[in-house]
């Protein structure tokens, strides 16, 4: 990539740029010709037919060439115009994609990724104070401090805002579930640096704990919740104990395998899990024993009756919203606090250098295990909530893709950044729910986004790390070291 | 002189290669012991055996101080720092690059803080004992920051420090574990003469004021000859000389090991000067 | 006994396919030390390109089946190799020297992208490939059970053996193979000695993708159906095979592939089909815990 090249003093050579673009176009042709150029279609009688889409191939090749030129322009300092054009193209292409045009969707995703790239370059190119790139302007620092409080205030009043109906609130609950999962996984991936690709397994353990206990022993949500978390944490310890000494990438694959094993067992252990049919009619949470129903059973008082309200199905949704909000905030408060504990600092130290940790007397296995178990426990709590909200669970909800989505939220948000995870969950989960027509492009954009972020901003969009302790009071401006390192680290690590 | 560390018959083989061969020596408390030798002599392997990264093929490594006697070859890696109180630095600096300087020093006090926080549980609920312990930890860190001239940089990310400061921070971090034996793997590598001179003072102070035994691998002869009380010379994994610096400096076996086998040849005067002798 | 023989043949066929994919994992791991998580999806793309190529060949009315297969083989290898090259260039090359989990996360992103890319372009439904080659040889018969080695299985095993031989020659005898082995040992030094490291790594991906393409073609021939999700499971099992054989070792990858194929065939044959994937994953976990260097791998010494 042309990133590391120094900026030429003026102008740019046209020829090399064109040559790059042609080469990229040629490769794009080779890639597009078989997969885009021909579409396999079913023909009657069980054979295989083909339809051609050569026009789309041309669009793809041109898109790649234009994209390549745009990247060259960015590298030569023209990020802002590129950003403007690419955002426009993104909007237009996605608008057409809503009409069901696949090729427009692909173009839209490409333009969106290019927009990310241009935005990052534009941000870096802003006229920072002359003394160093290491200083963040006070306005940014102030915004960074105020934003979490603003989010919290918004979250607290959100269900009562005038435009919020049941559909919007349902989406908000979904987003919050992923925020909680993201914050939980962040302990494992962001703080302790352990890549867990089977996180959804612990979510499943929590959900099935509640499902099975409710089905067979009549447990209520509030009784099952602590058990779900504990059992998931226990699973985390059982899995973690043998595998946590493995190297990072092996650990990732083993956790992936473990996630799949759990799913296959859930799918095939009919007597207990109901197999592919799952478990249905799981009871909803009650408000201190008061159900959210139009009419009470014998010996019960409904929520609406007790408070003298008119019954409305919204009550239950609002209640669910506050349950998951509270659960997510607990995870957040826990994470913020434990970062200042010795074990939290040891997690981060392990992420940075395990060998140095051992030489300082830190037991790596126990420390990793604690992060793994705590992360698993939070997934278990979230799983219990999921079961209670859906009222129905089946193995389909716990596939690898689910783990990948949660990981994408953590990675895109900026590993270790609590606020970044909230933003990523809103963008990755919330937006596609509103634009359901674009749903088919969602995972495509997830994948492309993960690659793009790793290539261009490996520490995530919000990579700022707040120190857990200071010797000197902050001076309004602060070290922007993390961002500087993103670029340097690439050369230094070789 | 009491032996803090006693190494007996240490042998380390990797497949067919014998990196350290039947090595025995002692290092005393309140002394600086240097291990020198040409490249590939097995110096770092000795360190890795001492600090638990390798399990020696044969040998006994005994560490004895007021807190008890430990057989290092039988301890788990992290217990060597935790119980036997041996701290080390690394040839290629290993800092927690994205954490601040101060955080690096606090992490070094992990086990003490862990106990004070009731293994996290009490600390999580804001027990005052943990707050007190953390304050003490910061004070110890501040002490070492001052002695390594890093106080102003305390809130910098460790990865952004200049090279010399990173070396000093690694020593400060090792000292924050409150060790009885400090093992330094080429601490002067890459330092300029002024920094190297400061390092000498720091190490002497660690020996004299803090009473910590120092075990040092070094190539820089000026450091070795000026500050060490006792030098062990390795070549091809064997000990070829052992004694005070003046004796080692003039030992023919050492000169041979460093300069090759041609015994008849007169040493060029500048090399003798480098070794610290008088031509 | 007859049943056992039949499972043995099935297992060997399956193992040949896994082995071909596993070589891609093991080569890439050897040279840049990363798990190319998207490799399974490159295999899946190979399978799709193969069925598209078959459909194209039919429209030309080519009658000779061996010639058609050969043609499809070449076309599939070339176009899939382009995907292998592009994946490396876009998702991995810019990340060399980034923090250690970055390439893996990027690879996961690439895998998700490729799956959805194919799903969008070719549809989510299963694509059938009508049986091209029918019949086979009946080896023995007894207890009312005939042990059959069908022609597809024969082709798969023969092609795999031929490719393995050719491939071993490339690695041990050619300048490219030497450059690859040099980069494996010490990339910096290889660069200093004038080896174009970028090109060598690219070619490694191209070769891995071409072999995965062959595996994809064989998968399509053997099972007769292809969908956008086949890369996930096959990739994971091939990775297991690479680890079992000792990651970084080419004969290990082939051995591991055959073992995984046999285990899967026998497990399905004698225990339960539902849990056959659990068997493969469990082996992965057990190998990594108890013998992380695999059967033929070299031990890694931790550098401090």
Image: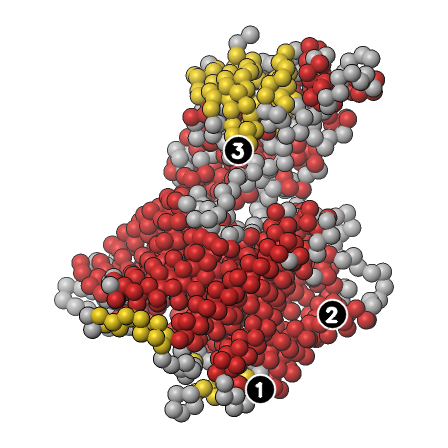
Which picture quadrant has residue C147?
A: bottom left
Instruction: Give me the C-alpha separation between circle 1 and circle 2.
Output: 26 Å
Q: Looking at this view, is A223 or B22 the one in front? A: B22
Circle 1 is placed at which residue position? Answer: A53
Which picture quadrant has residue A257?
A: bottom left
Q: Chain of mark 3?
A: B
Circle 3 is placed at which residue position? Answer: B16
Residue located farthest toward the right when viewing the structure as drawn: A10
The verdict on a common chain for dots 2 and 3 is no
Q: Chain of mark 1?
A: A
- In percent of width and height, residue C297 lies at 48, 47
Q: Which secondary structure, mark 1?
A: loop
Residue at image location 18% in from the left, 58% down from the top: A217
- In percent of width and height, residue C207 lies at 58, 64
Circle 2 is placed at which residue position? Answer: A20
The structure's colour scheme is: secondary structure
Residue at image location 66% in from the left, 29% down from the top: B39
């Amino acid at each position: 990539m042309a990133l590391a090249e120094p900026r030429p003093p003026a102008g740019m050579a046209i020829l090399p740029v064109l040559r790059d673009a042609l080469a990229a176009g040629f490769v794009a042709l080779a890639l597009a010709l078989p997969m885009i150029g021909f579409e396999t279609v079913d023909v009657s009688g069980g054979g295989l037919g083909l339809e051609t889409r050569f026009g789309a191939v041309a669009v793809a090749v041109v898109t790649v060439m234009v994209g390549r030129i745009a990247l060259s322009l960015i590298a030569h300092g023209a990020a802002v115009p590129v950003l403007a054009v690419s955002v426009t193209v993104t909007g237009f292409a996605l608008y057409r994609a809503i009409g069901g045009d696949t090729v427009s969707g692909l173009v839209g995703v490409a333009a969106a990724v290019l927009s990310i790239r241009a935005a990052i370059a534009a941000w870096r190119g802003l006229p920072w104070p002359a003394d160093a790139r290491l200083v963040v302007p006070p306005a940014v620092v102030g915004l960074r401090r105020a934003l979490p409080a603003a989010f919290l205030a918004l979250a607290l009043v959100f269900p009562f805002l005038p435009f919020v109906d049941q559909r919007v609130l349902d989406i908000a609950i979904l987003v919050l579930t992923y925020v909680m999962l993201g914050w939980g996984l962040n302990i494992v991936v962001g703080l302790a640096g352990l890549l867990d690709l089977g996180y959804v397994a612990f979510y499943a353990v929590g959900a099935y704990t509640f499902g099975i206990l409710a089905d067979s022993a009549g447990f209520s949500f509030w009784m099952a919740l602590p058990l779900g978390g504990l059992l998931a944490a226990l699973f985390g310890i059982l899995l973690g104990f043998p595998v946590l000494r493995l190297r990072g990438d092996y650990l990732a694959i083993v956790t992936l395998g473990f996630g799949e094993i759990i799913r296959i067992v859930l799918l095939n252990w009919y007597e207990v899990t109901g197999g592919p049919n799952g478990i249905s009619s799981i009871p909803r949470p009650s408000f201190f024993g008061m159900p959210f129903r139009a009419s009470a059973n014998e010996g019960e008082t409904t929520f609406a009756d007790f408070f003298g309200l008119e019954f409305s199905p919204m009550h239950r949704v609002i209640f669910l919203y506050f349950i998951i909000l509270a659960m997510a905030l607990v995870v957040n408060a826990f994470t913020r606090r434990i970062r200042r504990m010795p074990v939290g600092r040891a997690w981060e130290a392990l992420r940075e250098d395990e060998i140095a940790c051992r030489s300082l007397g830190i037991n790596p296995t126990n420390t990793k295990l604690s992060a793994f178990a705590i992360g698993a426990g939070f997934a278990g709590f979230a799983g219990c909530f999921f079961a209670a909200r859906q009222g129905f669970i089946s193995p389909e909800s716990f596939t690898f893709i689910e783990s990948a989505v949660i990981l994408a939220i953590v990675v895109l948000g900026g590993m270790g950044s609590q606020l970044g995870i909230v933003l990523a969950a809103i963008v990755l989960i919330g937006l596609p729910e509103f634009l359901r027509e674009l749903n088919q492009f969602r995972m495509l954009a997830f994948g492309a986004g993960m690659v793009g972020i790793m290539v261009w901003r490996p520490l995530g969009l919000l990579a700022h790390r707040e120190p857990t302790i200071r010797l000197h009071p902050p001076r309004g401006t602060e070290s922007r070291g993390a961002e500087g390192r993103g670029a340097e680290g690439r050369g230094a690590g070789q | 002189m009491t032996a803090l560390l006693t190494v007996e018959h240490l042998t380390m083989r990797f497949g067919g290669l014998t990196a350290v061969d039947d090595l025995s020596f002692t290092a005393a408390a309140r002394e600086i012991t240097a291990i020198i030798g040409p490249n590939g002599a097995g110096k770092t392997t000795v360190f890795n055996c001492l600090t638990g990264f390798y399990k020696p093929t044969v040998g006994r490594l005994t560490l004895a101080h007021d807190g008890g006697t430990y057989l290092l070859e039988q301890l788990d890696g992290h217990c060597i720092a935790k119980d036997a109180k041996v701290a080390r630095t690394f040839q290629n600096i290993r800092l927690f690059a994205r954490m601040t300087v101060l955080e690096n020093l606090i992490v070094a006090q992990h086990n003490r803080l862990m106990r004070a926080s009731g293994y996290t549980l009490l600390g999580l609920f804001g027990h005052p004992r943990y707050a007190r312990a953390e304050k003490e930890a910061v004070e110890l860190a501040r002490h070492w920051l001052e002695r390594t001239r890093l106080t102003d940089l305390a809130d910098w990310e460790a990865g952004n420090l200049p090279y010399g400061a990173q070396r000093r921070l690694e020593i400060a971090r090792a000292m924050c574990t409150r060790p009885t034996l400090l093992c330094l793997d080429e601490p002067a590598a890459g330092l300029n003469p002024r920094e190297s001179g400061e390092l000498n003072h720091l190490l002497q102070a660690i020996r004299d004021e803090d009473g910590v035994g120092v075990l040092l691998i070094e190539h820089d002869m000026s450091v070795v000859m000026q500050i060490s009380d006792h030098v062990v010379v390795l070549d091809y994994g064997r000990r070829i000389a052992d004694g005070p610096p003046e004796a080692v400096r003039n030992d023919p076996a050492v000169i041979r090991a460093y300069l090759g086998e041609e015994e008849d040849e007169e040493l060029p005067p500048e090399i003798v000067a480098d070794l610290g002798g008088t031509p | 006994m007859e049943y056992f023989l039949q499972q043995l043949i099935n297992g060997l066929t399956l193992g040949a396919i896994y082995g071909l994919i596993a070589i891609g994992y093991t080569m890439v791991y050897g040279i840049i030390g990363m798990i190319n998580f998207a490799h399974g999806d490159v295999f899946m793309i190979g399978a799709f390109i193969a069925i598209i190529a078959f459909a194209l060949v039919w429209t030309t009315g080519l009658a000779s089946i061996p010639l058609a297969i050969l043609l499809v083989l070449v076309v599939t290898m070339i176009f899939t190799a382009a995907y292998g090259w592009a994946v490396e260039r876009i998702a991995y090359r810019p990340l060399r020297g980034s923090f250690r989990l970055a390439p893996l996360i990027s690879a996961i992103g690439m895998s998700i992208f490729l799956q959805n890319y194919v799903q969008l372009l070719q549809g989510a439904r299963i694509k059938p490939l009508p049986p091209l080659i029918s019949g086979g040889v009946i080896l023995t018969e007894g207890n009312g059970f005939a042990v059959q080695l069908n022609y597809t299985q024969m082709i798969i095993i023969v092609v795999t053996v031929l490719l393995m031989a050719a491939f071993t020659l490339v690695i041990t005898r050619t300048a490219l193979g030497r450059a690859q082995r040099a980069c494996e040992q010490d990339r910096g030094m290889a660069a200093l000695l004038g080896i174009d490291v970028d090109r060598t790594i690219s070619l490694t991906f191209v070769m891995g993708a071409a072999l995965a393409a062959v595996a994809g073609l064989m998968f399509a021939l053997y099972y007769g159906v292809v969908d956008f999700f086949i890369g996930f499971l096959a990739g994971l099992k091939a990775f297991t095979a690479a680890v079992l054989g000792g990651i970084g070792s080419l004969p290990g990858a082939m051995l591991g592939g055959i073992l995984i194929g046999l285990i899967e065939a026998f497990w399905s044959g004698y225990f339960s089909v539902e849990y056959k994937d659990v068997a493969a994953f469990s082996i992965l976990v057990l190998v990594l815990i108890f013998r992380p260097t695999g059967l033929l791998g070299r031990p890694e010494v931790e550098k401090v």
